[in-house]
């Protein structure tokens, strides 16, 4: 929950006219849940 909140804060802070923009992918998790 804390990590998700931190990622949200970082993304919101990047949302301003002086940021160059670009791709902002979700970082990989500790394991792949697609196998389940």
Image (spheres, helix red, strand yellow):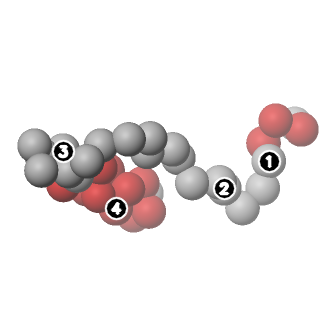
Q: CA distance from mark 3 to mark 1?
A: 29 Å
Q: Which is in the foreground here, disc 4 or disc 3?
A: 3
Mark found first going from the N terminus, 2 or 4:
4
Residue 4, visible in the rendered structure: yes
Q: CA distance from mark 4 to mark 3?
A: 15 Å
Q: Please, what secondary structure does the residue beneath circle 2 have? A: loop
At 89% from the left and 38% from the top, the residue drawn is 35
Q: Which residue is mark 4?
A: 6
Q: Please, what secondary structure does the residue beneath circle 1 have? A: loop
Mark found first going from the N terminus, 4 or 1:
4
Counting other residues with Cα less than 10 Å from the Cα at mark 4, is it few (<14), some (14-19), or many (20 or more)?
few
Mark found first going from the N terminus, 3 or 1:
3
Q: Which is in the foreground here, disc 3 or disc 1?
A: 3
Q: Please, what secondary structure does the residue beneath circle 4 have? A: helix
Q: Which mark is residue 29?
A: 2
The extreme right residue here reads 35
Q: Which mark is residue 32?
A: 1
Q: Which is in the foreground here, disc 3 or disc 2?
A: 3
Q: Please, what secondary structure does the residue beneath circle 3 have? A: loop
Q: Position of residue 19 (x, y in %)?
A: 20, 50
Q: CA distance from mark 2 to mark 4?
A: 15 Å
Seen from the viewer's position, the closer of residues 30 and 19 is 19
Q: CA distance from mark 2 to mark 1?
A: 7 Å
Q: Which residue is mark 3?
A: 15
């Amino acid at each position: 929950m804390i990590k998700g909140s931190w990622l949200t804060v970082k993304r919101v802070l990047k949302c301003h006219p002086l940021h160059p923009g670009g791709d902002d992918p979700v970082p990989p998790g500790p394991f792949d849940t697609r196998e389940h």
